[in-house]
Image (spheres, rainbow, N blue to C red):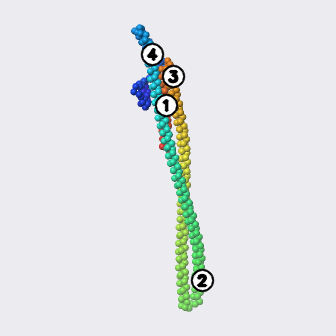
Amino acid sequence: ELEDKKKIQNLLALVGTDAGEVTYFCKEPPHKVTILQKTIQAVGECEQSESSAFKADPKISKRRPSRERKESSEHYQRDIQTLILQVEALQAQLGEQTKLSREQIEGLVEDRRIHLEEIQVQHQRNQNKIKELTKNLHHTQELLYESTKDFLQLRSENQNKEKSWMLEKDNLMSKIKQYRVQCKKKEDKIGKVLPVMHESHHAQSEYIKSLKDKLVQEKKLSNMYQEQCISLEEELARIREEEGMRREIFKDRTNKMGKRLQIMTKRYETLERRRILEVEGFKTDIKVLRQKLKDLEQMLYKATVNARANQDLALLCEVRDSNRRAHKIQGELKNLKSKVFGLENELRLC
């Protein structure tokens, strides 16, 4: 009863009351209404006492039922006014709840738009990264192709030079052998004529020495070229390993980005479906609440039109039904609020 009083006071505070209005708090009626009987008994006792006291005055006996009718009609009008105030308060509360639900739906739509923009920006960034990585990959492939081409060309040139040097070395060695054989033969033949041939021998020895120096230089150059070839081969192997590692890293990144994109698209589709279903649920709930409000207005209209002997009981039943419906409406609005809060939490988690 206290909760009902508090609710009615809150509703009256929301709607606003006039200076001359008075609120009445009615308890739930019993199965049988005893209000009319008490009033009838009281009226009968009063009539008996007054008829015994005022039998000579017939005008007073005629005025009393008219006063009772006026009081009962005033009581009905007050009850109807309280019901109308309750309905207006419920209408105001329903309007506020619909406004709040619309604002929440607009906020959810705005969040969805922002989320879509973030997804598009992330997708664009991923596309730009993929383009940049593919560009780097093509550049490294071109560099690798050029380096391998240069390496193979240098290798073939070095091989050709080594062949020419080996041939020249063989020719020089054969010439040296021939010169030695010739020198020995000449030494054997000439014998004593050695001082005369000393100058020619000295020239030949100098020529041989120069040839040996050239041979040493050629060996040094060949060793240097071999070392360069080995270093280039090692560099090529290192470049190939780095290229393989870059390809593996690029493949892993592309696979991860594709998986993330698929997960984001799936989440977006599920959120879109949930939002569509929840918007439809909100619309159906609003339709049901409007229909209930129309039913209440029709029942109030019937209650005002059909004023009969059992109007007190009908009005009390209507009041109790309206209270129950108001409780149901409040429960449904709480459910709607919980759904909206759940949606907001899901969006924050996403």
Q: Label 1: which residue?
A: 329
- Say whether marks 1 and 4 touch (CB < 8 Å): no
The answer to which quarter of the image holds residue 168 is bottom right
Q: CA distance from mark 2 to mark 4?
A: 164 Å
Count all numbered tags in the image, as a single digit. Answer: 4
Residue 178 disc label: 2
Identify the residue at image location x=56%, y=63%: 142
Q: CA distance from mark 2 to mark 3?
A: 147 Å
Asked if residue 290 can be seen in this view, the reply is yes
Q: Label 3: which residue?
A: 305
Instruction: Locate residue 11 relative to residue 173 in the image: left or right.
Output: left
When the figure is inspected, residue 170 is found, relative to residue 65, above or below; the finding is below
When the figure is inspected, residue 257 is found, relative to residue 24, above or below; the finding is below
Identify the amino acid type marked 1: Ile
Of residue 47 and residue 313, the one placed in the foreground of this image is 47
Identify the residue at image location x=49%, y=31%: 329
Q: Secondary structure at mark 1?
A: helix
Q: CA distance from mark 1 to mark 3?
A: 26 Å
Q: Label 4: which residue?
A: 66
Q: Could you tell which of marks 3 and 4 lies nearer the N-terminus?
A: 4
Identify the amino acid type marked 4: Ser
- Could you classify mark 1 by the number of other residues whose Cα lies within 10 Å: few (under 14), some (14-19), or many (20 or more)? many
Q: Secondary structure at mark 2?
A: helix
Image location of residue 145, percent across then percent down:
57, 64
Q: CA distance from mark 3 to mark 4?
A: 20 Å
Asked if residue 253 can be seen in this view, the reply is no
Identify the amino acid type marked 2: Gln
